[in-house]
Amino acid sequence: MNTTKQKLLDGALEAIRVHGVAGVSARTIAAAAGVNQALVFYHFGSVHELLAAACSAGTAARVAAYKERLEGVKSLRELLDVGRALHEEERELGNVRVLAQLLAGAQVDKKLAAPTADALALWNAEIEVTLSRVLTGSPFADFADVRGLSRAISAAFIGLELHEGVDPEGAQSALSALEQLAGLLEMVDDLGPIARSRLRARL
């Protein structure tokens, strides 16, 4: 990719981290990128188009960074472990703030809604693939709505990320509750074949 375009993409995300969506402009983006603000319009046409491209490129890069770890997940507990690690790393990088700002901005600016939804879809797709693999052979595999469940997990982690900003202890408690639920599902998977067959029939 053109070096200037990459600087602008990175600058857009940094501007959101520092100023929030409401404070993002061609000037703040250019300052973060270290380039002339006219280049925002030369390369992307508008600030909104740049934000959409930055949201897409930034999310794709983060999904790619976790792809190998997600491919190694063999249980719901392991998926939650990856989710916890992802949350900690993304918070340190300032990406949780970016996501929170984009979600808030999308509520009042419909031009941000589509790129934000597309970015979330990238995560949902990876989670869906992981869940399909993890649930294979489980008594729940025949009736679980994997697509819906993947979005529920994604939404839960987004909620935890936002919740943590005002109630860190409550967010950690909620995550622990999810881990307990994963433990219960593992117990079901450890049942013998007769018990599993009866459970599958009841489900």
Image (tube, rainbow, N blue to C red):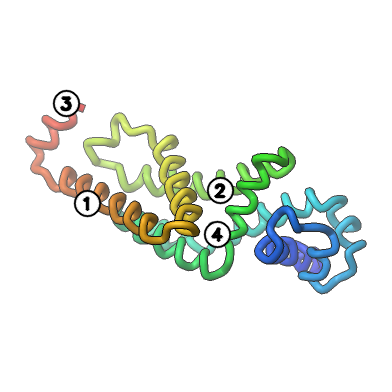
For the residues carrying marks 4 and 1, which lies nearer the camera in this image? Answer: 4
User: Which image quarter holds the N terminus?
Assistant: bottom right
For the residues carrying marks 3 and 1, which lies nearer the camera in this image? Answer: 1
For the residues carrying marks 1 and 2, which lies nearer the camera in this image? Answer: 1
Decide which of 142, 8 is in the foreground and name it: 8
User: Which image quarter holds the C terminus?
Assistant: top left
Residue 51 place in picture, x, y as percent: 74, 53
Of labels 3 and 2, earlier in sequence is 2
Check disc 3 and report the residue beneath it: 201
Of labels 1 and 2, earlier in sequence is 2
Residue at 72% in and 41% down: 109
Look at label 4 and name its amino acid: Val
Look at label 2 and name its amino acid: Leu
Residue at 63% in and 53% down: 101
Circle 2: element type: helix
Q: Are marks 1 and 2 in contact (CB under 8 Å)?
A: no
The answer to whether residue 165 is left or right of residue 72 is right
Asked if 50 appears above or below 19 in the picture, the reply is above
Of labels 3 and 1, earlier in sequence is 1
Decide which of 79, 178 is in the foreground and name it: 178
